[in-house]
Amino acid sequence: MANVETVQSNRPERWHPASMALHWSSAALIAGLFASGWWMTGLSYYDSWYHRAPWWHKSFGLTLAALLILRVAARLAFPRPPALGHLHARRAAHVGHLLLYLLLCTVLVAGYLISTAEGRGVSVFGVVELPALTSPFRDQATLAGTVHWYVAWSLIVAGVGHGLLAVKHHVIDRDATLIRMLGRRA
């Protein structure tokens, strides 16, 4: 059995390609879902997109949920590069990543609760339907909608902070944090 130092030294210098693909596709979906959600709040009942846009939003939201499951699996399956920076920065990065995952899970669950508030399942691109797994509770759509809105904003703020800190690592600290997620060698 390998000792801890040997395992630590065998870590890769960059992220696995699957992890990078999942990271960037998740980031694109989060940005697109946030933009579409914000846009949808301004639609009137008579707008041609009033009923179509939520269907697309839900389908892409459930796609993001599937990507999140794959991301967690990839994080467990593939070794990841060690965090760079001093001890406090590495700990803060760990807490920041946990926060991003927590916010993402919360916004997805809240979206699911909005969509199933009437006891019906959610169609995913008209191909498969995710059933309503909970019985609706009082004011489910309203409560979940409020959580969904505020957590979505929190996720965007945290995501922008995540991106800015990656740029800070590249420009100010001059370390490989950002380029490793871009698929380049340090």
Image: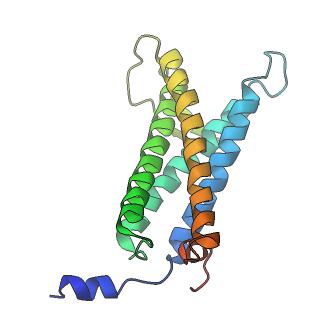
Q: Residue at x 79, y 22 (%)?
A: 43
Left or right of residue 133, residue 156 in this image: right
The image quadrant of residue 132 is top left
Q: Residue at x 56, y 62 (%)?
A: 23
On the image, the x and y values in percent for residue 141 come to 52, 18
Q: In this orientation, which residue lies closer to the viewer: 96 or 114?
A: 96
Q: Height in image: 74 above or below 164?
A: below
Q: Height in image: 134 above or below 184?
A: above
Q: In this orientation, which residue lies closer to the viewer: 113 or 152?
A: 152
Q: Height in image: 120 above or below 89?
A: above
Q: Residue at x 37, y 61 (%)?
A: 88
State the scheme by which the image is colored: rainbow
Q: Height in image: 94 above or below 4?
A: above
On the image, the x and y values in percent for residue 127 come to 61, 45
Q: In this orientation, which residue lies closer to the viewer: 146 or 53?
A: 146
Q: Quadrant of the N terminus?
A: bottom left
